[in-house]
Amino acid sequence: MARILITGATGFVGGWLVDELRSQLPDAVLFGTTHSANGTEIPGVTLLPCDITNPEAVRSVVRTADPTHVVHLAGIASAAGGNADTLRAVNADAATTLLEAVAALGDNRRVLLASSGYVYGATTPGNPAAETDPLNAIGAYAESKAAMEEAAQTFCANESNAHVSVVLARAFNHTGARQTDAFVVPAFAKQIAQIERGELDPVVKVGNLSALRDFLHVADVVRAYRLLLDADLPEPVTVVNVASGVGVSIRSMLDELVALSGADVTVETDPARLRPSDLPECVGDYGKLNRLTGWMPTHSLTQTLRETLDYWRGQTA
């Protein structure tokens, strides 16, 4: 019987992954970590408080869960900010501690580390990034994910760790209900929902609208993670893009959200929403993921945007 540990289980992606696992692997025993000890509960999941930057806390959680599979989601997300040292400690060093703790259990284990498509840097128009492409991480967040990947490669190069197989899942942008408005799509959706209710003037505050991004529904991302947990992997550490292969401009997503709403709005650039390391384009090729698992995106962008807008309509209500 699978015993699955999800770090960051109370976060945005963690919540969706729990739903996916409970639906598709109902016999699995689920454990999750949470940074908070405030009594948060998730039905069907044993939650374990854990500061992932505390090595002893990580080792204790791993010993308690004794997982056959681990999905490592805990960390600082790209929209959350943070300095380079903090990002490296949370996103890279903690992953090394986790891998070492899992290796100490013995037996065959699999660990999926959630990386990012941003490790490629800017991609070339019409040429989505493939796993064999060189990395060109720009900015502290992307650099911390690249450092995590390098640490995983070093870990797997040690023959004593051969019983732990590692997946580096380079997920490109993903969104959906329950994502905070620190991210671009929910930021737009929340403002539009508030405008619809008369709580805001009909002005949407925006950052850079020209950037092209590869967006997935979060449900498609967590389905990919689930499939990768049991896939027949070709290497001790397997790098896989989780992407749609299609670039869409931030402007086009805003326009579609406005069209779905029907609200009469104007757009105003907010300097606070502009990022110094913003990439003009970042799109990935999901061919390897498809070959390994048969995965393909199943949610359209329109469906994703509509669900996100409906979620924020409920939140503002």
Image (cartoon, rainbow, N blue to C red):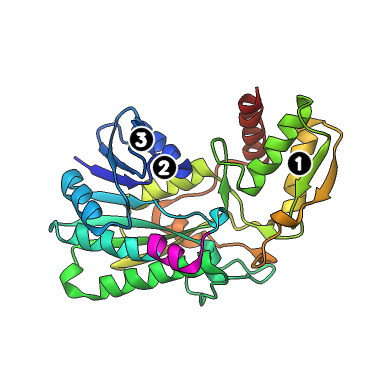
Residue at x 25%, y 53% (from the top left corner): 58
Residue at x 62%, y 56% (from the top left corner): 214
Residue at x 78%, y 31% (from the top left corner): 195
| Snapshot quadrant of residue 20 | top left
Residue bearing mark 1? 256
| Count of numbered circles in the view | 3
Q: Residue 225, percent across and down?
A: 40, 49
Asked if labels 3 and 1 touch by Cβ distance under 8 angstroms, the answer is no
SS for callout 3: helix
Residue type (three-letter) at the residue carrying disc 2: Gly
Asked if labels 2 and 3 touch by Cβ distance under 8 angstroms, the answer is no
Q: Could you tell me what secondary structure mostly forms the magenta stretch?
A: helix
Residue bearing mark 2? 14
Instruction: Determine whether, in the image, residue 94 is placed left or right of residue 298.
Output: left
Quadrant containing the N terminus in the rendered view: top left
SS for callout 2: helix
Of the residues under marks 1 and 3, which one precedes in the sequence?
Answer: 3
